[in-house]
Image: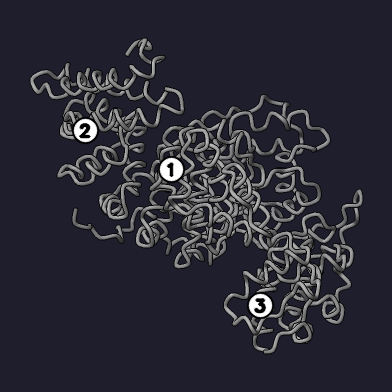
Amino acid sequence: MTSLPCWVKNDSLVIPALKEAVLSCSKQLQSSSSRVNQLTGARELYNLILLVWSLDTRLARDAADIVCDHIRDTGGLESLIQLCSSSDISLRLAILKALEQIMVADNRKYIAGHKLFNSVVEVATSNESLEAIQSGTGILENLFKDSTQTCHRLIKRGALEGIILGCRNTDLIVLQHCAAALANCAMYGEAKAHAAMVTKYVDHWLFPLAFSSDEVVKYYALLAISFLAANPQVSHKVAESGTLDLVLPFLNNQDTEEFTRSCPNHAHGRSVGWLRRLVPLLLSQSEEARSLVAFHLAMEAAIKKKQNRLQTFSEINAFELLRTAAKKGSKLTAKFCTEALLTSSEPLPPYQCWNVINWSAVEVASWVGNTVCALSEDTVPDFTLHHVTGSMLLDLSVDDLMEIGFNSRVSCKWFLEEIKKLRCLADISGTESNEVCKWLTDHCKELALYRTDFARKGITKALLPHLTEDVLTEIGVSTRLDRLRISLALKQCAESQVFDTPDQGGAGFVLPTPALNRKFDVFISYRRSTGSQLASLLKVHLQLRGLSVFLDVAELGSGKFDEAILTTIARSNNFILVLSESCLDRCKEDTHVQDWLHKEIVCALENGKHSVPVIESNFKWPKDGELPTDIKQIGTWNGVSWSHEYQEASVEKLVNFLQLPAKARRMRSNTRSYMSFNSVVSEQPA
């Protein structure tokens, strides 16, 4: 297929011409006496399907389905499966590349039920060449979304380990396939696969993918971690990896239309089966999962509208779930749900909980009507008669409810529990108390219900040192336990001398997150533009060896928050400096120490931190005299040359260089590599 055929521009000729081309390729593949014909058939089939996917969006999906079905019907798929274990390396690679491109639903099912399924998986997990890894991980990505049973069989055959190894790769195509494969495994594999994924530390290995600069890799890694977080059986384990913390910052900076344009992978949308597994997460307990699914459905709605396939949303009950999530979700979730509904010309919900402070009496009455359906009608008064607004609703007490017309104190208490949930969802981002409230909930999620009290009382950072138990009671912190939690957090700030920090430019002191209050075994310093992948890999490798690691994942430049990072360096036992390509260039003429990598190195030196550089192969040391005198000492540090091919050996050498307390060394000696675990998913009969 050296040039575009004339029929590409004529819709009426496309399908017949494609079928004729497929038949020709299938006949060549079935030519058992000619290896040359087989190789030609596989390569032409690969080029043909690439041509199909390049067609206009409205035609490509239908044409691809027809072509892939015809490949199977004419015996081409059977020939590809039979030849995938060929001893000829060139033919085997051509077969892998062709198979990857034709993995529509019926072809996946055909392969999954084939007697040579294990052989296909074995070839797909081989590491013969970069091209083989690219196509092999692409095949696994697709097989993971065949069925729950197929997921379990793939895990049993070692496919999950193959994908985990791919997460260490530097090739973008491989990383994209690995991220999508893990998302499909989490989506289709259900609870049994989730347990296997956590056992093999997939939640940790997703971190470098979610930290990637590539939007596709990042997106599917975040989708995978969201599915794991939505499973209550493993959610507590997943939270420890830190990967889930990357979901909301990613979504806060996204526009669905721009994201779809920048990611060709999303251009044709997703199948009904895939979306059917996605939409239930709109009702998940995980805010991250709800928000990410709402984002995807907002994208999908625009694509399906363009394809004239919005009926897909009706088939999977997406519209009703979107309205429910828009009503009960956070501001971010509601934003994307609303976008999906508006794109689909669907009615919006009568209220949104995040906006409760601004609710009218009508919206309050609507919420009450939806919320109290569990109570008998004679128990619930008519709120419209009392003109209760959203702000008033949040302050109601048992006595208030009895006065309004509730005839049971038990019903009042039940109703107040529902109001507590509203308090946790209320958006206060535009208030001066927002930073204080975020600090509270970072310390303890149970304190989220007091956010509106702090906001409406105008509690800012400056007032925190003066919050006594009496003042907390006056604010509305109702239980002694919650007042104790807040008092202990304030005491911790006082002991760390947070409140003593002088005001600079009106910013005042910095409220530390729980993470910045900890003492870490290792602080990793890196240049974001060139060192983020290695830094994130080091984080995972070290954490899996039982070490506590701090890696700043937020964008620098947020004012005094960045200063708290320097305190974290001072509190850490070791300082690892990732020396990646051109990472020190900005330091060369940074005479006023404005560059943050420069600041971190200086801080490590001034605090006498045990420092170890990890040196990438493309890093070049600056010439003599180019580095400022305050950091030229780094050239004398003993370092580790990083090898992507031999990561385990590189990390072992690095760990041996670190100065670790006895407890950390004991934890490290008791930590097994993820590769030592056997699959926990049993083979299921085909």
Going from N to C along the chain, the mark reached first, 3 or 1, is 1
Question: What residue type is disc 3 on?
Answer: Glu
Q: Mark 1 points at which residue?
A: 180
Q: Mark 3 points at which residue?
A: 417
Residue type at numbered disc 1 = Ala
Q: In this view, does 359 lie above or below 577?
A: below
Query: Callout 3: helix, strand or loop?
Result: helix
**Residue 555 location, quadrant:** top right
Q: Quadrant of the N terminus?
A: top left
Front position in the image: 169 or 53: 53
Q: What element carries label 2?
A: helix
The Cα–Cα distance between marks 3 and 2, rounded to whole angstroms, is 57 Å
Q: Which residue is drawn at 16% across and 30% down?
A: 75
**Residue beneath disc 2:** 72
Q: How crowded is mark 1: few (under 14 residues within 10 Å), some or many (20 or more)?
A: many
Quadrant hosting residue 288: bottom right
* Residue 461 left/right relative to 637: right
Q: Distance between the residues labelled 1 and 2?
A: 25 Å
